[in-house]
Structure formats: structure tokens, C-alpha cells
Image (cartoon, coloured by chain):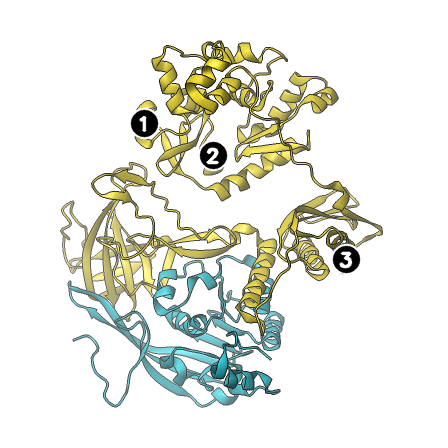
Chain colours: A yellow, B cyan
Amino acid sequence: MTAAGFPPDEPVAVMFANRVVACSAAARRGGVQRGLRRRQAEARCPGLQLVAHDPDGDARAFEPVVAAVEAFCPRLEIVRPGVCAVATRGPSRYFGGDDALAARVTEAVAHVGGRAGIADGSFAAELAARAGRVIPPGETPTFLSTFSVNVLERPELADLLHRLGIHTLGAFAALPATSVLARFGTDGLAAHRLASGEDERPLSARIPPPELDVTAELDPPAERVETAVFAARGLAHQLCDELSARGLAVSCLRVEAETEHGETLVRRWRLEGATPLALAERVRWQLDGWLSDANPHGPTAGLTLLRLVPEEVLPDEGRQLGFWGGDRALDDRAARALLHVQGLLGPEAVTTAVPTGGRGPAEQVQLVPWGDARAPTSSVLAVDNPVYGRYPPPERGEEPWPGRVPAPSPAAVHVHSIRAEVVDANNEPVTVSGRGEPSAEPSRISVDGGRWTDVSAWAGPWPVDERWWDPEAHRRRARWQVVTADGTAHLLAIEGGRWSVEATYD
Amino acid sequence: MALPQRAVGEGQAAAPELKNLARPVSLARERTLPVLPALAGLLPEGGLRRGSTVAVSGATSLALALLAGPSQAGSWCAAVGLPSLGVVAAAEVGVALERFPLVARPGDEWPAVVAALVDAVDVVLVCLPRHVRNGDARRLMAKARDRGAVLITTGGSFAADVRLAVASSSWEGLGKGHGRLRARRIDVVASGRGAAARERQVSLWLPSADGGVEAIDRANARCLVS
């Protein structure tokens, strides 16, 4: 949620398929919960900001938080992007008690508005984290007893309990377990266990397979990439032998490098069908990117340590390439090159375009980072409407977009619209009235304060009034196609009396 | 030698394919990537010769149209340094978007990015920065020649094998306050080195009324949009 760029004290909810999947603390205070419909959430919390669900982005944004928490306790479980749980017994002994541990974790994640709480069981701990509290051992049932049954996130059960006059977890926990099982079934019993401060299941913290790590200490420190890559090749061979002896294949590799001055660079690589050569290549790319002059955070000394850690391993099922090379090999080759470029410039730098619905040339495609799912996710929230059906439609097909700029589409779509001025024959600026009537025929235009050129042909205005239901995204403008005397064709837009060049038919 | 990308089928249909594959040397004609038929007249071998460079000036859509042929034949294409590329226009002219990664802002790293892509992608479209170091240009051309990829450049100056320039262009379909842009007629002049040294001129509808590319027969040139 922090990734969406909202301040932490603003009510924000993340929507997917018309349901709330996550919400900020302020929204929760306003009564918003996971699982609510959009209409219900807005009714409970006026001024609620809605953002579309982006699981890949969430996971990416959450990664630094996980890394920060991992510094205290390596065995953690990510409940979902935004929530992670750790078993505190060991770490709190080390850091001097639950309170000290909670304070340290809170401090480490404070920069993203994260909070920590400690209680018996992950359900109670999540509630404690929302309140930023540390519940002493054994007092969890008391802590839970004041919460409303809504926090169980079982809306139907909560609704029924309210109607039975059971409003708090304490009252629910006071019911005998056998009666709960008889009346509400196994799911009800699981909820009852949560309400009594017991957990559904023990924490299944991920234990990395430490015996698979391979490390090389470089003495003397490697000053050149080539030296480090040579060492990495040996490591890669060792790792591949180790893996193949166990019948495993690595699908995600972590490469760690450390310099004499203690600087470290850690990066994860997703790979398929790792050979020693492919692994060594990853190390080379990573070091190339790190050591390149353009990187301001480059290392200041030689490399002393290289470590290859298989993050994810899976049973090796072998790989079959297409006969005569085939398309598959071609795709893999391209994918590897793109990964390399992502290593140089960062994951967001390489994009692929996915067609989506829209009117303007910029809205008809969406650029997603390479490697993310190519599913078209619209920035418009999905709305279920009994009359018009689902909006926007789930896939781009032949669905109509009235007012869409007709094909052929412009070959240059300006990322930031370029300012323009348009005047009529009397040198008066051309305007478009609220009813879509132009004040006069355009006669000359000037792009970005440049030379005035005569307009030889034009069409418009084509008024569009988009997303009027959303005050933030609402846009009202009129588009024109204009050909100037020198043969250039532009797509112009006037919005709020200001002209801009949206695209050029280059 | 670049292997054909189609797997061999069964029976008799496979026989000529196998014969091609078994042939030890590859002729220049086989080392070309197909382009849309309308553009074949611009290029000396009737296609994009692998390892060559093409400099396009005057129209982004012409560069996109060059990508369309290889892309439809299953090749990967990539665009580097074109933040304002009209991807919809690319799709309309025939570029397969799922095989068309974009690196919009490579910054100073652009030679490294292009070199990485040339390794694996058949056609790389690059918008060159204003100043290109001679060494970078030479290295990239050598790399493209070595890997059998085609570099298409826009902007900047580059000693390319083939240079395509738009001599004139005029839009059809838009009137004084009515109609819409329907098609553009452009005259493209091709020049270059070696086989491309003889200057050729071709008139095209780009985009044509259906969004693609169409050659204009000079003998009976007619108005596409009445």
C-alpha cells in the first residue's frame, strides 16, 4: 500500500474483483475490512481512496520489509504481501525480551509505516500489530476478548453471531467448543479456536537449505570482474554437482558479493535449467552492472567474498528443447538477454506492452515490467453492474469504446503532452465550449512555443468525458486531428482551455 | 548459420525442409529476414540481411513497418530509447507485441543494452542519442554482424549499410473541419553502401487505409481515398 504512494494516515483500500483485499489503518478505523464490496466500503468510510490490486508490485514493495525483519529472525513466514510472521521465542531471548524485539522491528520497518506486535498465535499477533502492542504470554485471550467478531474475516459467520447477540470474540470464545462445532461446523470451530487465542496451525517458517550454499573467499581480493567470474565458475560447478547429486534444479538463485570495505550486493535471479555456465553468466552480469561507471553506488574495493545461494529448488524434470533449435530456444535466449538488461537498469526498465481498452492512443496499451504476468489489469476499478454487465470488460475483444481515436494510430505518443497554441484567422485562441462547439476554425498552430505554421486540414472537436464517476481520474477534453502546411499530422487535445499535442502521426 | 525456426513436419512436406537444413553453406538470400512485401523494393536483397544496419530518418512508422515482417515470421524485435513509441501503431502495422520488449530509457548504458539485445534478438530498433562515439557504433555494428542480428536506427547519424529517408509525405482523408486521417502517402528514398548503393525510390501508403503498408504502383497511381 505504501508503494501506491499514499501517506500512511489516509484511508486507502486495495480492490480486486470488487472486493477489498487490503486496507490502511485509517480505513480500518473507518470500518473497512477485507472482503467488503466496493459500495459497502465507500459507505462506511467516506473519502476512501481505492487502488487496483497489483500482487506482483505488492510483493516487490514488501520485499524490503521482509529483508528488514529477516535481519532479526531469519525464520519468517510471509502470510500475504504486507503481513509476515516470525516465531519470537529465540529472537526475543537474544534481544532482551518481547518488548525490546518489538521496538527494534518497529524501528526497522517504520520508514514504510510498518508496525509490529507480539502475541500468542499469528492471528492475535496480527491484531496486536495493528494496535502496535506486545501482549504478555498467556494474556492473549483477554486481549482478544474485546475485539468484534468481524475481525475473524468470516462475514457470514460474523453476521450470524451478531444476530445471535454475540458481538465480541470473548463472548464467542466463552461458548463450549462442542456446541460451536455442532452449530457452525468445522469452519466455525476453526474461528472459535482463533477467538480463544489458539492458532489454526503452527507457524511454518521457511528454513533455507543451508547445506546447498557455496561460498568462495577471494584472497587476494578480486579487483577485476574476470577474476571474480573465474571464481564464480568454480562455485557454479560445485553447486550444480551438489544439486544434481540430489536430483534438484534451481529456479531462483541468490548471488551475494562482498568487498573488502564491507559493501555487499545481493541480487536474486530467476532461472530455468541452470548450467554452470549460465550461473557464472549471472554473476558476471550482476558484477558488470555493479562495477559499471554509471552506477553511483559502486564498490570502493576489491571483492573478497562470493556466495551462491539456491533460493528455490525443485525436482529436476529435465528440459526439452525444440528440434533444430526451435522457437523455444529463441524465446529463452531473448528472455536471458532481457534479464541481463534488467540487471543493468533495474526490473522496471524493460517493459512489454499489453493491449487494454481505452480511447486515447496512450490508454490503449499498458506497459508491464518484463517478467510480470501479461494479464491486462486496468487502472479502472472493476464494477459489477446488473444492467451493463461487468465494466471494464474482462478482455479486449471487439468491445466498443465510443469516442475512441480512430485507426490508424499515431506512431509517436508523447509521454508528457507537449504544450501547443492554436489560433483562428483573427489570431484569437480557439476554444471549445461546454457543449463541444469550437469558437472558430483553427488557422495556425505553434507547438511548444515554436514557429507558427498554417493548418491545412483539421477535424474535430471530438469531445470525451471520461471516468466522471471518479473525481480523481475524471477528465474532460476535446481532441482534434490537425495537418499542418509542412505535412505533419498531430493529435491535439484541449483540456480546461489549454492545448497540448497528445501524439504525432510520425 | 541461423537455423529455420519451424520444426520439421511429417511426411513428404518435410523433405524440402530437410534438404535445406542439410545444405552446408547458406546463401545470402537465406540470411535475410522477410519484410512486408510492399517494402521489399527498398532493400537490396528484398529483405533485411542478417548482420546489416538500416538507418531510418523521417518517419517512426517506417521503422515500425520494417519490424513487422520479421516479427510476423516469429522473430523477436526490441526497441531501445524510444519512450514515446506508439505501441498501438506498431501492433496495427503487424508487430507481435508479446515478442516486442521495450527499453524506453537506457540512459548512458545504451551501448551495453543494445549489445545485450543484439545477442539474442533478431531485430533491434534503436533511437540513437545525439552524439554517438565512433567506437560504440563500430562495436555495435561488428556485434550485429557477428550475431546475425539487424540494427535499425532512428535519429543520430550512423554509417549504416542502408539508409532510408522520407522524401515527402502527405495525408489523405482529412478535410477542412471534416473527415479523419485515413492514409498517408510517402516517398521513401533508399541509398547506402555496396549492394544498396544504387538509389531506389518507392512510393508507399504508410499507413494505408487498413493500417498496414501498401506499395503504390506508379504507372496507375490513384487516389486511395476518394
Residue at far right of view: A219
Q: Earlier in the sequence, mark 3 or mark 2?
A: 2
Binning the other alpha carbons within 10 Å of mark 3 as few (below 14), some (14 to 19) or many (20 upward) gives: some
Q: Are marks 2 and 1 on the same chain?
A: yes
The three-letter code of the residue at mark 2 reads Met
Mark carried by residue A40: 1
Provide residue A211's location: percent of width, then percent of height.
77, 43
Q: Judge depth for marks 3 and 2 and give the one in front.
A: 3
The three-letter code of the residue at mark 1 reads Gln
Q: Is residue A113 left or right of residue A419?
A: right
Q: Earlier in the sequence, mark 2 or mark 1?
A: 2
Binning the other alpha carbons within 10 Å of mark 1 as few (below 14), some (14 to 19) or many (20 upward) gives: some
Provide residue B32's location: percent of width, then percent of height.
50, 81
Q: Chain of mark 1?
A: A
Q: Are marks 2 and 1 in contact (CB under 8 Å)?
A: no
Residue picked out by circle 3: A237
Q: Are marks 3 and 2 on the same chain?
A: yes
> Secondary structure under badge 2?
loop
Residue B151 visible in the shown view: yes
Q: Earlier in the sequence, mark 1 or mark 3?
A: 1
Q: Going 63% across and 36% down the picture, which residue do you hit?
A: A67
What is the number of callouts on the image? 3
Provide residue A234's location: percent of width, then percent of height.
79, 57
C-alpha gap between disc 2 and disc 1: 20 Å
Residue picked out by circle 2: A1
Along the line of sight, the residue nearer the viewer: A328 or A163: A163
Q: Chain of mark 2?
A: A
